[in-house]
Image (cartoon, rainbow, N blue to C red):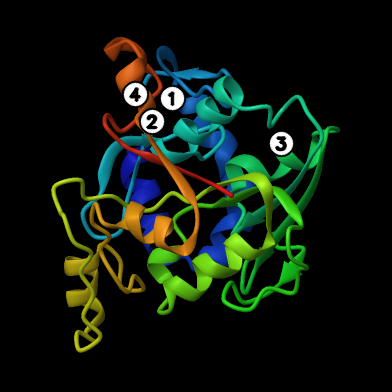
């Protein structure tokens, strides 16, 4: 019943409104799904199951009831915590389209100067076009830009802007929806029907499906790219406990 109610809620409420309403409805999901089988590593809370999520074809058991994190958020959290100095050293951080699972937690960190940006998000400090950023060169030590580039028609320009504002030696984590079986990125602007776009691209507002060539495109912009498969370094039981997507690659781009 809770899963069905959540699907109805998710598919009918605009995203900006959903962010605000979720603070009110989240306690209902947290209480109803209490258990020990699955754990959200972001806050350490455990549940009997996670919630469904997705546009069109929904993925079951993927959305944390407590932080509202998805597989990619929990994977990123583990990477930042276990493999970087993000939480321990002073950093200037730029976060595109800040996710609700991270926003308040990152804002409270005393070691980072945290700036959020987006054209539409109510959580953005700076309203800006990713292809024309209002920041000086070499401004940020960490840049987080997750599931954004697939929405951007000129993703090359966006990558160039991210590279420009990243400090030398800095790290940009640029997660995207992944189809690891696809070698080449696919896009077709002639497909205009929203339902067909959702079927082909995963969402009606995606403009491409990235392939394995995504990593080389980042390299062509100037980044040194490490393709991090964190789940391959973890016990399978832990991958399932945290509800991660096995084999998801974290694109870690450095300048």
Nearer-N-terminus badge (4/1): 1
Please, what secondary structure does the residue beneath circle 4 have? Answer: helix
For marks 2 and 3, the one nearer the N-term is: 2
Query: How far is mark 2 from mark 4, CA to CA?
Result: 19 Å
Q: Is residue 99 left or right of residue 226?
A: right
Which residue occupies 17% across, 76% down?
196
Residue drawn at the location 36% of the way across and 14% of the way down = 234
Q: Secondary structure at mark 3?
A: helix
The residue that mark 3 highlights is 105
Whether tag 4 and tag 1 are in contact, CB under 8 A, the answer is no
Cα separation, mark 2 vs mark 3, equals 21 Å
Q: Residue at x 42, y 57 (%)?
A: 218
Position of residue 192 measured from the top left corner of the image (x, y, whole percent): 24, 87
Badge 4: residue crowd in 10 Å (few <14, some 14–19, many ≥20): some
Do the CB atoms of the residues marked 1 and 3 lie less than 8 Å apart? no
Which x, y percent locates residue 55? 30, 59
Q: Is residue 92 above or below residue 10?
A: above
**Residue carrying label 1:** 33
Query: Disc 2 designates what residue?
Result: 50
Instruction: Judge whether residue 24 can be spotted in this image.
Output: no
Label 2 or label 4, whichever lies nearer to me, is 4
Residue wearing tag 4: 231
Whether pointer 2 and pointer 1 mark residues with C-beta atoms closer than 8 Å, the reply is: yes
């Amino acid at each position: 019943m809770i899963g069905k109610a959540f699907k109805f809620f998710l598919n009918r409420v605009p995203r900006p409104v959903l962010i605000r309403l979720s603070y009110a409805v989240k306690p209902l999901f947290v209480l109803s799904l209490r258990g020990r089988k699955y754990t959200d590593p972001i806050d350490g809370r455990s549940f009997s199951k996670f919630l469904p999520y997705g546009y069109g074809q929904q993925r079951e058991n993927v959305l944390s009831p407590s932080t509202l994190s998805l597989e990619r958020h929990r994977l990123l959290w583990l990477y930042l915590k276990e493999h970087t100095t993000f939480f321990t050293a002073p950093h200037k951080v730029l976060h595109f389209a800040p996710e609700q699972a991270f926003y308040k937690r990152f804002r409270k960190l005393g070691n980072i100067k945290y700036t959020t940006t987006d054209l539409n998000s109510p959580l953005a400090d700076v309203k800006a076009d990713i292809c024309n950023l209002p920041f000086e060169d070499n401004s940020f030590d960490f840049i987080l830009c997750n599931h954004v580039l697939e929405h951007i028609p000129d993703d090359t320009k966006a990558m160039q802007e991210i590279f420009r504002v990243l400090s030398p030696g800095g790290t940009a984590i640029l997660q995207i929806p992944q189809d690891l079986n696809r070698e080449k990125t696919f896009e077709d602007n002639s497909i205009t029907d929203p339902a067909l776009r959702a079927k082909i691209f995963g969402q009606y507002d995606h403009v491409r499906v990235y392939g394995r060539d995504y990593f080389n495109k980042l390299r062509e912009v100037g980044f040194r790219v490490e393709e991090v498969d964190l789940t391959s370094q973890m016990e399978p039981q832990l991958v399932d406990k945290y509800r991660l997507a096995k084999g998801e690659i974290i694109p870690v781009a450095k300048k």
